[in-house]
Image: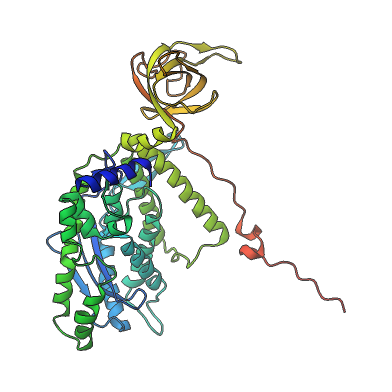
Amino acid sequence: MSTLTALARAQAAATGRAQPIATVRHLHVHDYPLVLVPLAMAGEANAPLAALVGTDPDKPELLVVTQPRDRDERFRFADRLGQILIAYVDTFADATEDVPIDRGKDVRTRYVDAPQLWVPNPGGVDFLRLFGRSTRFRTVDGEHPVPVSVPLLGRWLTFFANSAEVPGSALLLNAVQALGLHWATGQSGAEDAQLGVLLAWIEDGAAAARAVENGPVAGPATDPDFDNKVLAPLIERSAPELPDVLREVMLPTWEKMWRVLDLLRRLPAGSRVGSRWDSDRDAYTAFTQYVAEGGAPQPRRDGAVAAAARLQRLESAASRYAVQRAFDDPLVLAEYRLAGAAFAGTVTLAAPDRVDDSGKRPVLRPRIMVRTAEAVRVEPGTSLTSPSRPSQKARVISVAPVPATGETDVLLELSGGMGRKLVAEPGSVPEVGERLILTTLTEEFRRGGALPDPTETPWTHGGPPPLTLDPVT
């Protein structure tokens, strides 16, 4: 937990009101999302019991498995869920746009929008991942055929579950983590995992949260008392009222999900949220085309090289997401200022027309002086970036304390983001009196390390087995 988040939690506990820890929304909230509230059978891994699903808050569709251990009923459940999900994702596979690549020398095509799924909590994401794994390899012919929609459902659920692992992706979101990204409560992280309590803290405060502590669970696990006293007898006698009972249990969570969406929509979106959604649209476009071309289901597990490449992508996405959140949100950036990775100051001197002619050709290298009252923990030669000018680099020339004031003067040399001429474009160089934040964080793309071909890995990692010599006789 960061220092400012810990402070916000302490303030929330003292005041009885959740405290904002973000000034903007750090995720894309779709105008037309698909909300899914799943319930699983207790005591059996990934046995679906019921789901409320739909795109209209007033018209959820209830899917129920009245006998969760009945294979045929499970696949009828999967068939209907597949029909709903596939119909939803297909609505975005129509309008396309051309995106310039290779510095405008070529274009590629992607869909103008993408689907977005919402579940109540991380457990819902895990349920979809497991359910996708149990359905995507099913066959539509042979000894135990299933409807065509079942394996296709599994592939789409796996796609969404995999995307949920990518920091900053908004294709599959859960309400608990989305709220926790923007508000801090005065309770523990474990207590925040209960959607009803977390939402009550944010909307009405601690007293309201205490009142709903024993309310209905948000799934996919069910309440043990409900299982023993209500659910088990209904399933045992195949009671026709089971769907109505489950609907009554799940409707409060369904309503809370839409309140979460409304709450998040009230926050202005961060300026870099759109670019991350563009990446999600790219991923959706690529997977849609892959499925249409008859691509194979996702493998049960990645090979060594594929796993390393995926880990590399996730680490890169996590680093980029952290920087983008800091650049979008002063509250997030304040964490880095406390840690000494950023400081704020005022420009006191500026030489916007300075040209460095010491090399083979002259280049524009303006210099500015920034005075700050914050601690400066960077050394000469360090490259800094300002969130207001992310494409411009500021190299530290010197760091000098100002006598008697306790402030520090930082001399910086600028490069990039000023045009291609020896005269800086208007507004590209900070002016005297401008308030500036400088940080060691950067959005600059970092190329990952080279990975070997799968056939060149050792046999312990999936490559060819070692050469076997004939025994000496």
Tell me residue 399's x, y (percent): 50, 19
Q: Is residue 49 found left or right of 348 in the rendered image? A: left
- Quadrant hosting residue 348: top left
Q: Nearer the viewer, residue 198 or 124?
A: 198
Q: Nearer the viewer, residue 194 or 297?
A: 194
Q: Residue furthest left?
A: 58
Colour theme: rainbow
Tell me residue 193's x, y (percent): 29, 59
Tell me residue 219's x, y (percent): 26, 67
Tell me residue 407's x, y (percent): 41, 19
Residue 182 appears in view: no
**Which residue: 44% across, 46% down?**
317
**Which residue: 38% across, 39% down?**
324
- Quadrant hosting residue 374: top left
Q: Residue furthest right?
A: 473
* Vertical placement of residue 472 versus 213, above or below: below
* Vertical placement of residue 347 versus 113, above or below: above
Residue 472 appears in view: yes
Quarter holding the C terminus?
bottom right
**Which residue: 27% across, 77% down?**
76
Number of numbered labels in the structure image: 0
Q: Nearer the viewer, residue 118 or 159?
A: 118
Q: Is residue 350 found left or right of 209 in the rendered image? A: right
